[in-house]
Image: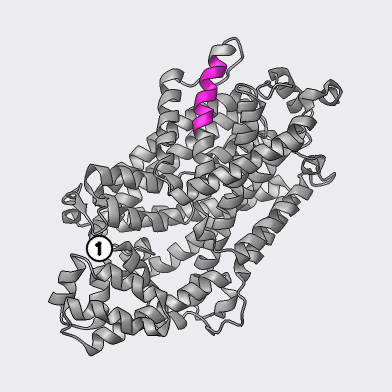
Amino acid sequence: MSIWRLKPVSAFEADMKKNDLKRVLTKWGLTSLGIGAIIGGGIFTLTGIAANEQAGPALALSFIIAGIGCMFAALCYAEFASVLPVEGSAYAYSYGTIGEIFAWFIGWNLILEYMMGATTVAVAWSGYFEKLMHLFNVHLPLYLSMDYSSAKEMLANSHAITSIQDYLHNNLHVNFESFKSAADILNTQNLPAVSEVIAALSNTPAKDIIESISVDADKKVLEASKFYPLLAEKASQANFTQFSSNYSSVDLPGFSFNLLAFIITWIVTGVLIKGIKEAASTNNIIVIIKIAVVLFVIIAGAFYINTENWSPFIPNKIIDFKGESHFGLRGVFTAASIVFFAYIGFDAVSTQAGEAINPKKDVPFAIISSLVICTVLYILVSLVLTGMVKYDQLDLRAPVASAFEAAGNPIAKYLVVIAATAGLISVMLVMMLGQTRIFLGMAKDGLLPKFFKEVHPKFQTPHKSTILVGALISIVAALTPIKKVSEMCSMGTLLAFSMVCLAVMILRYKKPELDRPYRTPAVYLIGTLGAAFNIALMFFVRKDTWFTFIIWGTLGIIVYFLYSKRNSNLNNSEAQEK
């Protein structure tokens, strides 16, 4: 009854023979799933934030660094996938090499990764689809566009921006001290957001901007926003008039519900229940659209490149009013930690081993090829983007679309929004697919109830767990301010990547005789570098995220000792033989 007991390789081989899932995925079908999971809205948004605030034109180097870090993990995943081509991904690999308690902890956190990942993507998709609707002058009321907390906060922020702009319009030659004292006047309207904006403006170099620019208020706020992400967020959200123009009504009747996120979750759930072949076909269509638009951005954007925008390639380091560093070499690495999460998804390929036609060869191929393809595309997009527009002038919310619009090519705005909208569907599809396959692998081992391994007799998919996952994601996405917890997705991923890098070295040492259709080159070097890289990135995550992560992990350990340890198949030889 040791908590470090290992699942024997023979048991994994027995699972593969008893597989109830339909094997229909080829190596290119698996690669498409990997690309579908990796390329989402991030390529159209993270590029602007990382270049504008941290790396400048050296964003391309940041993508290379992040890509190399991911490649270490991908090479380790590939070897495991060739040895143990089963549904559980990092969970299963840890179960066969490190021990049950560790495997459970990895699986428990993979649940968090995929669940939070899919929920975050559902909310992001609703935002992009709203943008698409706005292009055709179709608007929803605010209370059907997002959760109540976010709606209330954004409405208050729009009033805050309006209050500040009104004050500055009426006091064009305001000096620093009089502007700072205005906070008390503005706060009589009970708008906490005003204090945040005033606090950001009340520091050098914003102080100098306020005193030196005696023009209209919009320019004052937007000029200052170049230096302060907080203010940039408030200013880009716009004042009340601009904010309300995005909705048919901004009245909040005491509740708010993200209708679009709720609907898309159930559409994706329906596709997944129908079957892996249908899900893969849907994903393939979306991936073709995404890659076509990314190639359009690269090829069309190349004609607008001004090489002067690449100088200096690595901007000089600066310290902001909070004492935080931007640009320089540190900025390049900080940007790498930001764009790293645009790569998350290739590991989901390993959860599809049970539906691959030739998993021992095709899964490793798909993991590595999907990551290489996406890395090349990311690097080219970042070079084109920073070549089209000076890095400090990049729009933070829609950098690609804005760059083309400024270049006199507004059609790109439509293409980018369509691609991002479609792209996020495929990310969500693969995330939810991975979630249910993790449940399936854990349930087969007895660590979760049998409910999670029941397969539909006709569709040959785990329909019950898929419906449960769809229900949870749709409710959380519709009612929760998900931006506050979305980093939890990253924590689960980084932990899984680190453990796979360690586990592949352990298995190579303990079981050198195993048949390995794919072998990680220089495994001890690659595994060590991969584990170190991903563990290091965990320390870039906010303290609040660590706190939540510890709570979730503690809950998982409690569940393990109350249920999973007692019901594990390793306790019962009869259960393992069935």
Q: Based on the displayed image, in which of its 4 quarters is residue 27 positioned? A: top right
Viewer-side residue, 576 vs 372: 576
Q: Does the magenta stretch include residue 570?
A: no
Question: x and y percent of residue 400 in the render?
Answer: 36, 61
**Residue at x 62%, y 76% (from the top left corner):** 255
Q: In this view, does 339 lie above or below 12?
A: below
Most distant residue in the left direction = 212
Quarter of the figure that contains the N terminus:
top right
Viewer-side residue, 337 vs 484: 484
Majority secondary structure of the magenta segment? helix
**Residue at x 59%, y 41% (from the top left corner):** 553
Question: x and y percent of residue 455 in the render?
Answer: 80, 42
Pointer 1: what residue? 227
Q: How many labels does the image show?
A: 1
Q: Residues within 10 Å of mark 1 (few under 14, many from 20)?
A: many
Q: In this view, does 14 lie above or below 380?
A: above
Q: What element carries label 1?
A: loop
As drawn, is 274 to the left or to the right of 174? right
Most distant residue in the bottom direction = 170
Q: Which colour scheme is used?
A: one colour
Q: Can residue 89 be seen from the camera position used here?
A: no
Viewer-side residue, 468 vs 85: 468
As drawn, is 547 to the left or to the right of 96? left
**Residue at x 69%, y 34% (from the top left corner):** 354
- Kind of residue at badge 1: Phe
Please state the extent of the stretch shown in magenta in the rendering. Answer: 498-508
As drawn, is 134 to the left or to the right of 376? right
Question: x and y percent of residue 571 in the render?
Answer: 79, 24
Question: x and y percent of residue 172 in the render?
Answer: 19, 85
Quarter of the figure that contains the C terminus:
top right
Q: Can residue 56 be seen from the camera position used here?
A: yes
Most distant residue in the top direction = 513
